[in-house]
Image: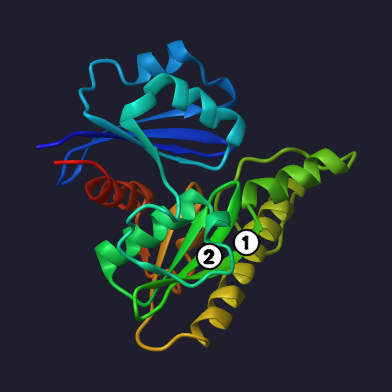
Amino acid sequence: MRNFLLVNLNNTSTKFALADEEKLLKKKVLPTKSLSLQAVRQAIDQWKFDYVLLSSVVPKKTTFFRNLFRSRMKEVSSELNLGIGIDFSDPRAIGADRLANAVGVTNRYGAPAIVVDFGTAVTFDIVSAKRGYEGGVIAPGLGVMTDYLYQRTALLPKIDLSEPVNVIGKTTRDAMLAGAVYGYRGLVRQIITEIVSHLEGKVRIIATGSYADLIAAKLPELQIIDLDLTFEGLRVIALRSFPL
């Protein structure tokens, strides 16, 4: 049985998973800004794997992994055998993590489906009833929006995101939390409503990413939270991409 090192390289964090042909075995996370040869080696110390599959949206860091793993690594792109169709003007421009999400949701939950991935940006990726990647929506991430208020105003504090006590804030922090969380749920709900109106069949809506638990807690439109969905997609792509 083959073992795979799966790497999801994003702007904020780089996530590693060890997987076999059936399931994920172990996971680790490193801040992307602090990636180094020593840090990666320590993170995956004693992990035994045959091949490496990299999903990267950070070109400057991609070279690092190319040099580290060389011939036994492949990078996720529309040119690999993904097992789904692609209906997009320029397939090469689709983010690798978005492709992995589309493959993961199709393999685990079927289609049609929407994946809402709460990362540095929030992305909505759509798989049609015919199992084809249709494109999606990209909006600023929740953390980016709240950090912007802190960075661009003189008196508003930096806040840690959590469930607001009330929609009417009695402190500056509570008011910011209410605006961020309730406002973000409104953004997500409206985008989902518009997307669903363009799809046929019973649509599965899956949330993943850093703020999935927080936003989905009071947003019933997000039917399932699956924090391993991207890795599931990477595992399936790895099965199709490397020799037996």
- 10 Å crowding of disc 1: few (<14), some (14-19), many (20+): few
Q: Which structural element holds mark 1?
A: strand
Q: Where is residue 231 in the image (x, y as percent from the top left)?
A: 34, 46
Give the spatial CA distance, label 2 vs label 1. Answer: 6 Å
- Disc 2, disc 1: CB below 8 Å? yes
Q: Where is residue 29 in the image (x, y as percent from the top left)?
A: 42, 30
Q: Identify the amino acid type marked 2.
A: Phe
Query: Which residue is outermost to the left?
Result: 1
* Precedes in sequence: disc 2 or disc 1: 2
Instruction: Tell me which residue sits at (36%, 14%) in the image.
Output: 42
Q: Identify the amino acid type marked 1.
A: Ile
- Closest to the observer: 143 or 70? 70
Vertical position of residue 204 compared to residue 146: above or below: below
Horizontally, is 46 left or right of 229 in the view?
left
Vertical position of residue 105 compared to residue 56: above or below: below
- 10 Å crowding of disc 2: few (<14), some (14-19), many (20+): many
**Res. 213 visible in picture:** no
- Closest to the observer: 14 or 167? 14
**Which residue matches tag 2?**
124
**Which residue matches tag 1?**
138
- Closest to the observer: 88 or 18? 88
- Closest to the observer: 17 or 160? 17
The quarter of the picture where the C terminus appears is top left
Q: Position of residue 178 (x, y in %)?
A: 67, 58
Q: Position of residue 194 (x, y in %)?
A: 58, 82
